[in-house]
């Protein structure tokens, strides 16, 4: 079981590192899914990417892992409106990739559950 926890943690760290970097490498992907009621779209894309990177690195030390997992959950909740906006956009555009945006919505819940697993003290990887 320890190996599964370590692999899960390593994958999570890589996932959020890659996602965070992608906000800086490809911010144009995120611009159309920014809810129109939010200001400073590009800045928020960079901020959320920076938080993903920070929280990924905070997962590494056991001392900050639990806090990082809670912060990842908060971030996932905060960016959920962008996933909803993507679905709204795809519906209004009759985008054939609508199914992808619909699948992303429950995946967000799985990502929250995955992070939540590391909020529990008994799930240390050591």
Image: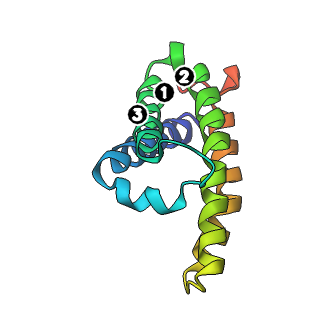
Q: Earlier in the sequence, mark 1 or mark 2?
A: 1
Reading the image, the residue beneath label 2 is 65
User: N-terminal of the two: label 1 or label 3?
Assistant: 3
**86 displayed left or right of 50:** right
Q: CA distance from mark 1 to mark 3?
A: 14 Å
Query: Which is more toward the observer, 18 or 37?
Result: 37
- x and y, in percent, of residue 73 in the image: 65, 36
Q: Which mark is residue 50?
A: 3
Whole-percent x and y of residue 75? 60, 37
Q: Quadrant of residue 16?
A: top left
Q: Tell me the mark number nearer the camera, choosing from 1 and 3.
A: 3
Residue nearest the observer in this picture, 49 or 53? 49
Q: Of label 2 and label 3, which has the lower sequence position? A: 3
The reply to whether callout 2 and callout 3 are in contact (CB within 8 Å) is: no
Vertical comparison of 126 with 97: above or below? above
**What residue is at 35 percent from the left and 50 percent from the top?**
22
Look at mark 1 in the image and give the residue it sits on: 59
How far is disc 2 from disc 3 in space, using C-alphas? Answer: 17 Å
The answer to whether residue 114 of the structure is visible from this angle is: no
The percent position of residue 123, horizontal first and vertical second, equals 65, 27
User: How far, Cα to Cα, is label 1 from label 2?
Assistant: 4 Å
Residue extending farthest to the top is: 63
The colour scheme of the drawn protein is rainbow
Q: Is residue 17 above or below residue 54?
A: below
Residue mark closest to the camera, 2 vs 3: 3
Outermost residue toward the left in this view: 25
Mark identifier at residue 20 = none
Mark 1 and mark 2 in contact? Answer it, CB < 8 Å.
yes
- Residue 10 pos. (x, y %): 44, 39
The residue under the point 68% across, 42% down is 77
Tell me the element at label 2: helix
Q: Secondary structure at mark 1?
A: loop
């Amino acid at each position: 079981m320890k190996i599964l926890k370590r692999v899960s943690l390593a994958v999570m760290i890589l996932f959020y590192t890659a996602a965070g970097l992608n906000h800086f490498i490809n911010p144009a992907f995120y611009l159309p899914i920014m809810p129109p009621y939010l200001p400073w779209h590009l800045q928020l894309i960079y901020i959320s990417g920076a938080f993903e990177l920070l929280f990924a690195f905070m997962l590494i030390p056991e001392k900050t892992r639990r806090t990082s997992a809670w912060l990842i959950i908060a971030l996932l909740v905060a960016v959920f409106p962008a996933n909803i906006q993507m679905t709204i956009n795809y519906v209004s555009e009759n985008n054939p990739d609508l199914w992808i945006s619909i699948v992303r919505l429950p995946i967000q819940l799985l990502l929250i559950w995955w992070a939540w697993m590391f909020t529990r003290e008994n799930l240390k990887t050591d």
